[in-house]
Amino acid sequence: MSVLELKNVKRRYGAVTALDGVDLEVAAGSRTAIVGPSGCGKTTLLRLIAGFETPHEGIIAMDGRTLADGKLCVPAYRRGIGVVMQDGALFPHLTVAENIGFGLSRKDVHREKVIGELIQTVGLGSECLSRRPHQLSGGQQQRVALARAMAMKPRLMLLDEPFSALDTGLRATMRKAVERLLEAARITTILVTHDQAEALSFADQVAVMREGKFLQVGKPRDLYMKPASRMVAEFLGDAIVFSAPVADGFAQTPLGRIAVDMAETQENARIMLRPEQVILQPALQENDATTTSDELMGAVSGAASGVVSEVEFAGATSTIAVKLLNDPDRPGYEVPLVLKGPGIEARSVGDIVRVVVRGTAHVLQ
Amino acid sequence: MRQTLASIAGALALAMIASTASAQDDGILVYNAQHESLAKAWVDGFTKETGIKVTVRNGGDAEFGNQIVAEGANSPADVFLTENSPAMALVDAAGLFAPLDADTLAQVGEQYRPANGHWIGIAARSTVFAYNKSKLTADQLPKSMLDLADPMWKGRWGASPSGADFQAIVGALLELKGEQATADWLRAMKENFKPYRGNSTVMKAVNAGEIDGGLIYHYYLFGDRAKTGENSKNVELHYFRNEDPGAFVSISGGGVLASSKHPKEAQAFIKWVTGKGGQDILKNGTSFEYAVGKDAESNPALVPLKELDAPKVEPANLNSKKVTDLMTAAGLL
Amino acid sequence: MQIAAGLVSLLALVPVGFIVWVAWQTGWEISASLIFRPRVGELLWNTGLLLFFAIPSSMVLAVALAWLTERSDLPGRRYWAWLCVAPLAVPAFVHSYAWVTLIPGFEGPLASILISVLAYFPFVYLPVAATLRRLDPALEDAAASLGFAPRLVFLRVVLPQLRLALCGGALLVGLHLLAEYGLYVFVRYDTFTTAIVDQFQSTFNGPAATMLAGVLVACCLGLLAIEAAVRGNSRYSRVGSGAPRNLVKARLGGSTIPCLSLMALTAALSLGVPLATIGRWLAIGGAAVWRVDAIGLALGQTIVLAVLGGLLTTAMAVPMGWLSNRAPGRLQRVLEGTNYVVGSLPGVVVALALVTITVRVALPLYQTMTTILLAYALMFLPRSLLSLRASIAQAPVELEHAAASLGRSPVRALWATTIRLAAPGAAAGMAMSSLGIMNELPATQMLAPNGTRTLAMGFWALSGELDYAAAAPYALVMVLISLPFTWLLHVQSKRMAGR
């Protein structure tokens, strides 16, 4: 059952429409990520859910109770929704302990104990309790902010780009830690981020947002592999897109005949491949067998020849541009494919390679 | 940085020197404790007649008296004008006045100048009890200034204790009744009176009925009536007479400082002020102070000086230091 | 630079040293009898009463107005914000003059407190409004999400953040209350400052005046100490990075009319009353009160004093502003602290010290422009220093290095970078000092060279003779030349907050 339900939520700022009819359902105990470029309205949406702002139209309901319906609006402080802001928003005039205990009753006899438990839960030592926010590192501040929000035992937790201020290494660790924590506490979570990798790895459900609307909502894997549009596809990762006729579950592409996820026949379909589906193999010698073991197993399809036009070595990975060697039979694909491969596979400019495709390609609508 | 600083400092220094020099060029400097408007009328008249330029620094009697003493022989002032005698006595006691020319002294009656001729009366004013007509009737008025010490007057009268005028009156009281009586009276006053700053403010309060009466000088009422009368329409003056300390007539003084670098011009100024030109300004102007020149007449609107039955007080004996000490001890300052 | 800063600080210590010296010369017994007497008790009571009621009232009023102009959807809040600063253009004694002539018999403690609040609340309003403007709204959102109603959010999150601004503003108000002369003379309320001037007028530079000054200095130091204790050493800077969101303005709804009324009432009392009264007296006086030669001369002298004083103050602030940015250290902190302490001393005390010292030991400086400018510099140094320091901080030394590496000689590098960048701040500091000098009264009266008559002196002399109509043009001119400076202050505070 869903904890949070949004129906046709709209919000304007003067002439600018920030949210243009958003629908969303968030299941209990799940993790949802809202991802989109900056200015797409994702933070506005979060603020509407938190109750910091009111929608002009539409319904926001939690656990069946209406929080806002365009006329009425339950204020933030009566919603019991936890929020962790972009940079923590710790109260600079209070100590860490006072920050964590801010939402707890001052008369609560267990107050100290709860604060002590929470600081441990978020993985900080109790020596931090007497410090002031500015004495903590960015990561520590975010942990305290999380502990502060968790102290209220919210049903729903909103995270507003909480990891964006952290540096790359810390970011992944923090994300993992927060994920585990919220999972253990069974708190339903909504994360707002502009980082698609973060969204995909964090959430059970990802909503891609652009210009105040959801382009697509779904499971991370579905969204990545089967995006509804080129826009979604390219927002979530690199994509190779070309037009090709489709028939009988196969597309005729510059890379050869490739299996697709559509059975119908279509004269001019738009086919999307993720670069990691494209594999480079050494070019076949004249006298080699015409099929590889992979092909025999049916794991790969298509086959074309290409010449390596550019190599950029970056340690663990290297980026390789491959220009297809045109077969007069097939429509040309002039733009080089940009692929990522393991850094240990040494390729050099001018190498002739065989290009095959792993898995099925996705037909965009 | 250093160069920039140095040039700023240099520019400032130049500006200061220039402005200092321009403030004290030729002409004489008068330390004026008299009313600014009266002093201005005198200065304008004098300059017009003689062409001698006069710079005026305005302040209070006691402030300037003490200031001249502190400055000693280095005083920049050439002439000192006061509203009352004690400050003149103070400067004279320090030996800082030059004797006045005999023909200047001859212009003013002996009762209005000290015997040693070191300074001279330039005007006079009488102590009065200014009262609100609707608050007090003639029979309710105090018979003597000393009556104001009575508890029945508590909260009903006012004065301006920080002013030289009132301090001169206290000086007369000290001279007439002695230290103990004065100290007692000041202590009682502290209990009874309401303090104001400036005699005009006292009169304004009387007019508004904030207090029944106030101990001030006579001319404030006349001056106000010559303008709008707004602050005096309910006010009447009560002259104590009977040689009461409250009938004290205070002599405004003028003197030439011994340290003056322009003694001729300074002497000429005092001569002019005590002569016809200066005394006529008292008669015709809006100061309403009494003229003290031998043949000079006061403004006809005033009660003649002779009818006031003032106590005889030697102006040179008025001790301003003792007065401020007693007033400080009484908590009035 | 060190030496220059040290010299300035030594100069700044002169007034305090003077009081100690006089006390020592006078001898303990006489000093004690002048300090521990009922009159001093009375003055302490009066002064305490004033501080106790006027400071908190100013704080409450200023916070309410600042919240309305910065955080609510009050109609016309941009204009109201300016009207909240504008009362500073009216010298305190003109406020008082207006009230006293409007309501005869308006005097005593209540009148003093009311007029003090109206004259000085902008000193609290300015920093509080600036802080409210740049306060991170995420903190308020966070508190709301933790279950706090708006009222509680304000009490527990916003108000504590305002502590620094409130402390600074309240201190400024307190020091002005202690130093103000003219305001309290009009409403017949005796404070230490008025009593010192009385003593000065009765005895010139007698020990009684100096001992009163000693107690007054103790009061100032007490205020400084209280402020330091309340302020604490906490930092309230914004934690974390990222641009703060735009503020959401609170909707007043049905409270709009009462809130507008509060604004209008404040503006009417703090601006309307003085301007209307000046207007009324001008109407009564007619053309006769416009003695253009006298007013013009006073205006000229006032401007000369204000400009020269402002320049000197800024020049004296340069070494300290420089050191505190480029070579901070313990010595620098001590030196800087000295300047602030002296800047908190009332003008009468500084003037009393300089009069006595020049007449006794430095006679060539006696009654000269140099001395009065020096007094102004000592009194207004902190005003210059504050904005100069902030603006030098905007010009990191790296810029100078960069200019040098691009082939500029050291002096030209300095000119091209630091001086250019610090100039607006220095100008603002100078404007602040000049504004203070233009409206200064007691020190000017005591120290000015012979023949000097500033607008404030002219106003004072005429209103002292109850010639309120003749005083009105002086008041009007003072307000008019002060207005641009207050406008500058308003704009500057907005810009600082917008950083």
Image (spheres, rainbow, N blue to C red):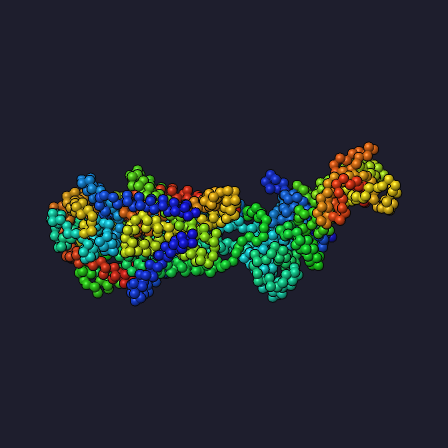
Q: Indicate the position of residue B157 as horizontal and vertical percent values.
A: 27, 56
Q: What residue do we see at 75% from left, 43% from top?
A: A348
**Foreground of the two, C321 or B287:** C321
Q: Is residue C210 left or right of residue C247?
A: left
Res. A160 in view? no
**Foreground of the two, C356 or C221:** C356
Q: What residue do we see at 21% from left, 60% from top?
A: B146
Q: Is residue C400 left or right of residue B285?
A: right
Q: Indicate the position of residue A181 as horizontal and vertical percent values.
A: 69, 58
Q: Name above or below for residue B318 compared with residue A23.
A: below
Q: What residue do we see at 30% from left, 41% from top?
A: C297
Asked which quadrant contains residue B333, the reply is bottom left
Q: Indicate the position of residue C261 as horizontal and vertical percent values.
A: 47, 46
Res. C167 in view? yes
Q: What residue do we see at 41% from left, 60% from top?
A: C222
Q: How many marks?
A: 0
Q: Indicate the position of residue A134 as horizontal and vertical percent values.
A: 56, 56
**Foreground of the two, B199 or A82:** A82
Question: Looking at the image, which residue sits at the far top?
Answer: A328
Q: Is residue C227 left or right of residue A60?
A: left
